[in-house]
Amino acid sequence: MKLLFIINPVAGKGKTRDAIPIIEHFCRQRGIQYKIRETKGPGDATLIVQEHSTAYSAVIAAGGDGTVLEVTNGLSGKNIPLGILPLGSGNDFARAVKIPIGMTQLEKALNIITDTTPQFVDLVSFDGRVFLNIASIGFDAEIIRDLHKISHFIKGKSAYLISVFLKFITYKPKDVELLLDGRKIITRVFLTAVCNGICYGGGMMVNPNGSITDGLLDVILIKPVPRYKIPFLLLKFIKGKHINLPYVTSYQCKEVQISSKENLAVNVDGENPINTPITLLLKPLSIRIFGNLQGG
């Protein structure tokens, strides 16, 4: 086994470098050949993987969901499995494949890479790129967009709380048109999530019944609710108890097209790479992942 580790040094509040000696000790103990590369900025992980991955039996993303997203795009079209060391702040896709999270669980996560067989899972393509977990528009996507702006001046959890508070006060529902495998839906939404995985936002269970191996996208539509009900909705949302609420509708399909009169921010695995209109296409069983996928 020969492993390429891609480490994002700014993930996990800048503590991911602490993983390097643990990774090195683990690999040396087991006689594993390895290379560790640190990213230097956005997009760097994708470029490293595209240029160097063919010499390795697997590529390991050490960081958060953004690192996993970049490494996944680098591996797109290659028959090289992906391992994940979830050391970021969200780590949502790692939850879907039941990988232990955090520095204290690092050796357990490494053991999954060395002791299990990678299994195929679904991917989602959009605009020449791919992602593994969830894309959304609406309330949450605007929080992420604003957070990126606020974080230039305020860091950490404070920036996130300010972004949520401001959006709670100012947010207006969005008029959208969706095509789900050709079926047209014109509606106004508080939030729309197109899901391969089960959770986002650091464990919010938007799609509690989802599967990353069923060959289908789950589309969760949340209709507008009175502002005073938003905290109640978000509490249900966190626990995955929102699916049967009267203003929540879910669909399954293989292709989703989303358009709107205004350019709406799209949240893709915690990033805002694009605005509407957007087309999302499920690519069944298109990448191999190390994880615990029983029942997933």
Image: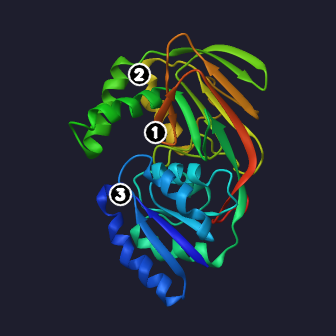
What residue sits right under mark 3 in the picture? 12
Which circle, 1 or 3, is nearer the viewer? 1
| Residues at discs 1 and 3 in contact (Cβ within 8 Å) | no
Q: Nearer the viewer, residue 187 or 35?
A: 35
The numbered mark, 1 or 3, whose residue comes first in the sequence reads: 3
User: Where residue 271 is drawn, which disc sits there?
Assistant: 1
Amino acid type at circle 1 is Glu
Amino acid type at circle 2 is Tyr
| Residues at discs 1 and 2 in contact (Cβ within 8 Å) | no
User: Where residue 226 is drawn, which disc sits there?
Assistant: none
Secondary structure at badge 3 equals helix
The numbered mark, 2 or 3, whose residue comes first in the sequence reads: 3
Image location of residue 253, percent across then percent down: 76, 33
207 to the left or right of 27: right
Q: Residue furthest left?
A: 153
Crowding at mark 2 (Cα within 10 Å: few <14, some 14-19, many 20+): few
Residue at position x 20%, y 36% in the image: 153
Which circle, 2 or 3, is nearer the viewer? 3
Image location of residue 81, percent across then percent down: 65, 63
Image location of residue 37, percent across then percent down: 42, 65
Q: Nearer the viewer, residue 36 or 250?
A: 36
